[in-house]
Image (cartoon, rainbow, N blue to C red):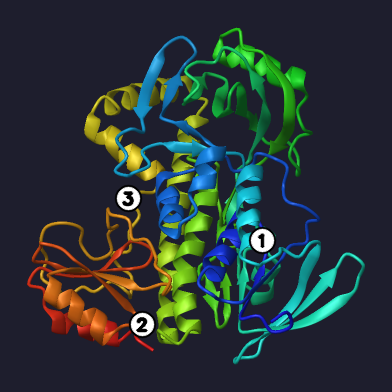
Amino acid sequence: MANHPQVLIAGAGPVGMTMANELARRGIGVRIVDKAPARTDKSKALVLWSRTLELLDDAGYVGPFMKAGMQAHGAQISTGREIVARVSLDTIDSRYPYALMIPQSETERILDELLVARGVTVERPVELASFMDKGGGIEATLRKATGETETVSADWLIGCDGAHSTVRHGLGFTFEGSTMQSDWALADGFIAGLEPKDRIHIYWHRDGILAFFPIVGDRWRVICDLGASQGEGHRADPTLEEIQALLRQRSEADLVITNPYWLACFRINERKVRDYRKGRVFLAGDAAHIHSPAGGQGMNTGMQDAFNLAWKLSLVIQGKARPELLDSYSPERSAVGDRVLRNAGRLTEAAIVRNPIIQGLRNTIVRFATGFPLIQHKIADQLSEMDIGYPDSPLTFQDGIGGSGPKPGERWPQPVPEGPQGARFTAIGPAGAVAALAQNFPRLVVAKPDSGTTLRLVRPDGYVAFADAHADRALAERYLAAIAG
């Protein structure tokens, strides 16, 4: 196993450890390495959105995250003198209608502990130095901090190794995009008196944005833009006094920040690869896409990359599905990456406009639009990634007769917890039809009869793959036969 794991994962951040957990809980042999000597101790990615929480719930381990995080129920946008908009997250169509605020250090701790309980230890500091796809498998060279190297043969390689990904470079993929020519400051510390504590507070000041994200108690993340970039690298990290001055200037309130955990300056990169796979090698998370922190969707998008790939790869490795199933990963997740990149960029551009006339127009439009419940609902579902679907996926069956309820490619609203048999499609519909599908495809389908007339197949990640209002079992069998190994 050590010298020939079924899957080698490079990178043990939230995405890599989610990938490892999702594979290991299905009985797949994994090794996961990371060149960092320890998990991060910074808050970094700060939110788990509703769709990610649903997937963690279906996987059976959302509980520790809920205990370690706090719920945020909305956002408030102000100029410092007047409220521009209030956005409620309570309208999210989910069993988790809120943002769970949790430092990335805690997210990594929980995922690491879950991995250890499954018998998998992250190997640190161990770096993926190089690899070669030999067609029938991967040959990789791992390098320890001592300089000692090890050659490992694996069936598959997944690069979850961040924005400077060795795996992406090894594939020769171009990281297309740009760096925004503006500097940003970040602070993570304690601020007393900022209310309500279960809201994100955003100030659209004439001199730039100032945003507060709750962490726990009186601990907050502060982000503000500093204007146009000067020189090649970003500015020096801010002092506490500089952050304090920005708080007073842009919030126009008597807010005091103390005891900072972290002070930093950064620039925003917006980049993405076109393909998430080549041969036996996959990319996920920041190795495939990086974007503005606006919306807080980067880590969530990466973790959902992992949920998408892991069930497919496990079925293929176990011989339950044909290798062609894996061809759906890149088009599905690349389309999502394009969308998240686009939306985050728009949010950032709207927030940093400096022209007073455009600022006034922006504020008027946002104030008017968020007055409509339907628009509030749409904003909440987009932020929480509840509106993500795969309508154009090669896995989405297009020939069934439509009925009421979720269509192929859309999210199924009910939980689809996984049993001890591992990843399987859930057949939902008339009892006779779903029982026959489970009997004919026992390694691929579990039956869940209901009183409806529509026959559906719901993927292990909770998206409708097939739907037919006439419960045409022959159509469903034809769909499954094209997947079954």
Give the distance between the C-alpha atoms of the residues marked 2 and 1, in whole angstroms. 28 Å
On screen, residue 213 versus residue 398, left or right, reads right
Quick one: label 1, few (<14), some, or many (20+) residues within 10 Å?
few
* Cα distance in 3D space between marks 2 and 3: 30 Å
Label count reads: 3
SS state under label 1: helix
Residue displayed at 49% across by 31% down: 351
Amino acid type indicated by mark 1: Val
**In this view of the protein, can residue 476 be seen by the observer?**
no
Q: What amino acid type should be assigned to the residue bearing mark 2?
A: Arg
Q: Which residue is mark 1?
A: 116
Disc 3 marks a residue whose amino acid type is Asp
Residue under label 3: 387
Marks 1,3: beta carbons within 8 A: no
- Dot 2 or dot 3: first in sequence order is 3
Which of the 4 image quarters holds residue 119?
bottom right
Percent x, y for residue 138?
66, 84
- Specify the label residue 443 is tagged with: 2
The quadrant the N terminus occupies is bottom right
